[in-house]
Image (cartoon, rainbow, N blue to C red):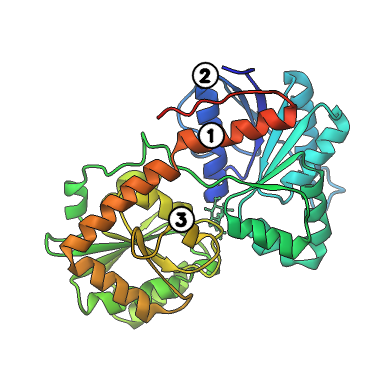
Amino acid sequence: MAKRLKIGITCYPTLGGSGVVATELGKLLAEKGHEIHFITHSVPFRLGQFQKNIFYHEVEVNDYYVFRYPPYDLSLASKMAQVAKMQKLDLLHVHYAVPHAVCAYLAKQMVGDELRTVTTLHGTDITVLAQDESLKDLIRMGINKSDAVTAVSNDLIKETRELLDIDKPIELTYNFVDKRVYYPRECSSLRSDFASKDEKILMHISNFRPVKRLNDVVDIFAKVVKEVPSRLLLVGEGPDLPKVQMRINQLGLQDRVHFLGKQDDVAQVISIADVMLLPSEKESFGLVALEAMACGVPTIGSIAGGIPELVTHGETGFLSPIGDTDDMAYNAIKLLRSEGMYAKVREACLNRARKQFCNDLITAEYERIYYKVLGIEADIAVPV
Ligand code: GMT
C-alpha cells in the first residue's frame, strides 16, 4: 500500500445522501488501512459497529448567552484545526460545500498550508444554495480555496461552473455502492407482507422534500394501478409527508399505499420492489436509483440533473421529462407487463452497478485525488 493517510471527514451525519456517501467512503478507506477521523456534530448514522482505524470527534457548539445564534460553523472550524494538529492529519475531506468547505479553509489558516483540503459537491449545495445571492460568494470562495474539488456528476460540474463562474478543475467522483451490501436479497416473506403473488411493488425512497415531487410519485402510481395490480411503498419522511397523505386520500388509494417511515436496512427494503420511482425536479446523481440498480430494481424517473448519467434510458430504466407522469406511468406499465423485458433490464442493472459504480472503483478515485493533492506518487490497484 502507498503511504497510509490520516484523513479528517466532515459531513452532515444524520441525514441525506451526502452523509451516506461520506460515511461509507470513510469506512471503506479505513478498511484499506487509512486512518479516518470523522469530525461531525453527531455520530454518522451509517457508521455501524466499531471498526478499526475509525475515530469520531464531536463538534460541540458554544452557546454562551450573548449568542443569539450559537456559531456552529466556527466551532466546527476550530475542531477541525484541533484534530488536524493533534492527530497530524494529512488532509480534510469535506462533503457538501456549505459551510464545510469554508470551515476547512479556516482550519487550514489555523494549521498551515501542509494541511490539504478536498471538497465534494453533492447537489443542493450548488443547485439550491448557490442560487442564493447571500451565499454565492462564500460558496465560490470555499471551492476556490480547496486544494481539490470533486462533484458527483458531470451535470453538477457543469452547473457549478455556470452558476459560480468557477475555472478550477472539478473532478468527477460518482456515488457508489458497496457490492457486499447492495445485491438482490432474498425477501419473499417480507414481500408477502405487502403484496400478493400477482401484485407488483412500486417504491419511492427520499427525504420527502419538494424537489422530489412526491405528488408525481402518487400520480404515476394512480395511473399504473389502473392497469397493473400493484402497491406503492413510501420510505422516508420529511416536510411533504402531509401533502402526500392528502393526495393519496383524495385519489382513494389509501389501501394500496404503505408508509414505511425511515429505514436503515435499505438494501433489504429495496429488494422487495419491482420498480423505483424517482421523478425529481433536481437530482445531482440519485443515490437511491443506484442502490436500486445494484439490487436489480430498475428506476422510472425524470430527465433531471445527473439521473441520465446513471440510468440509461431503455436499458437500466426509463426516463421522461420532469412532470410527465403519463409517460412515466406508460413506461412502468410496459416494463411491469413484459417478463422478458423486465428480466433483460434487471440483468443490465446488476451489470452496470457492478461495473461502473462499485465501491472499489470510486474509492480508488478518491485515493488518487488525495495522493495528488499531497504530491505523493501512488499506484492504486482496483480489485477486479
Ligand atoms: O437528495 C437529497 O435531498 C439529499 C442530498 C444530500 O445533500 O445529502 O442528496 C444529494 O447528494 C446525494 C449524494 O451525492 C445525491 O445522490 C443526490 O442526488 C443529491 N440530491 C439532490 O441533488 C437533490
For disc 1, the marked residue is 363
Above or below for 117 versus 130: above
Q: Is mark 2 within 8 Å of ligand 1?
A: no
Dot 1 crowding, Cα within 10 Å, few <14, some 14–19, many 20+? many
For disc 3, the marked residue is 310
Where does the image place residue 213, in percent across and percent down from the top left? 48, 71
Q: Is residue 170 left or right of residue 102?
A: left
Circle nearer the N terminus (2, 1): 2
Q: Quadrant of the N terminus?
A: top right
The answer to whether any part of residue 119 appears in the image is: yes
Above or below for 196 versus 38: below
Q: Mark 2: which amino acid?
A: Lys
Q: Mark 1: which amino acid?
A: Thr
Where does the image place residue 109, in percent across and percent down from the top left? 87, 34
Residue plotted at (48% across, 29% down): 382
Q: Secondary structure at mark 3?
A: helix
Seen from the viewer's position, the closer of residues 15 and 316 is 316
Circle nearer the N terminus (1, 3): 3
* Camera-side mark, 3 or 2: 3
Q: Residue furthest left?
A: 197
Q: CA distance from mark 3 to mark 2?
A: 33 Å
User: Is mark 1 in CB contact (under 8 Å) with mark 3?
Assistant: no
Mark sitting on residue 52:
2
Where does the image place residue 264, in percent across and percent down from the top left? 40, 44
The answer to whether any part of residue 273 appears in the image is: no
Q: Mark 3: which amino acid?
A: Leu
Above or below for 228 versus 170: below
Seen from the viewer's position, the closer of residues 146 and 55 is 146
Instruction: Give the mark count.
Output: 3
Q: Quadrant of the C terminus?
A: top left
Residue plotted at (74% across, 49% down): 99
- Quadrant in the picture for residue 182: top left
